[in-house]
Image: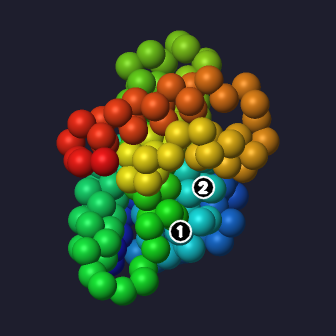
Amino acid sequence: MGFIMIYCLKDCKPLGQDPTKFPIQMYCNDGEYSAVAALWFQTPESSVRSLFHDPKGSHNDITLAIFVVLYFLLAVATFGLSMSSGLFIPSLLIGAAWGRLIGSGLSRLFPNCVVLNPGKYALLGAAAQLGGVVRMTISLTAILIEATQGISFGLPLIIVLIMAKWVGDFFNEV
């Protein structure tokens, strides 16, 4: 699925401005890298870091939307298998991608607002996705504050995690 997405979308960005650690040229011209291939072929941890820290405009909205749907379907398929495949990082990656998509959409709606940073929305989306899956509030807040080294995001993280837990509890038995 990733190869088809990389080939069809061809989300190529010029080299030199690439925020990814290891740019991949796949199906791009010389001097360009594929932002889609960077999402699919980096380690999931690197992709999460990339979604948190990349500047505005480094990811196309269509790319993020398709990536979220495909990665979610793959994660759902592997979560149901009776094998050890991980839950923590895929949930973070899915949440970071849809959070970044929402942040990017808001920054397009309000272009004059310099406070909107899609990376912050990626953090909140990752917290919401993981919080809804594992239903931890206080401990996950502490983990994410320690990981980001920013206490200033404590209140939004707590609000997002409590809402995610309530929504998860509403749809499933505790």
**Hey, which quadrant is residue 71 in on the image?**
bottom left
Q: Is residue 94 above or below residue 61?
A: below
Left or right, 89 with respect to 152, comes to: left
**Residue shown at the point (26%, 57%) measured from the top left:** 69
Amino acid under disc 2: Ser
Where is residue 170? Give x, y as percent. 24, 36
Question: Looking at the image, which is closer to me, 146 or 43?
Answer: 146
**Residue shown at the point (31%, 48%) measured from the top left:** 174
**Residue shown at the point (33%, 55%) measured from the top left:** 68
Lower position in the chain sequence, tag 2 or tag 1: 1
Q: Is residue 132 above or below residue 167?
A: below
Where is residue 43? Give x, y as percent. 56, 73
Amino acid under disc 1: Pro
Q: CA distance from mark 2 to mark 1?
A: 10 Å
Give the structural element (helix, strand or loop) at label 2.
helix
Task: Report the residue marked by disc 1.
Answer: 44
Where is residue 135? Give x, y as percent. 43, 47
**Callout 2–callout 1 Cβ contact below 8 Å:** no
**Residue 88 in sight from this viewpoint:** yes
Q: How is the image coloured?
A: rainbow
Left or right, 148 with respect to 33, comes to: right
| In this rendering, the label closer to the viewer, 2 or 1 | 1
Task: Report the residue marked by disc 2.
Answer: 50
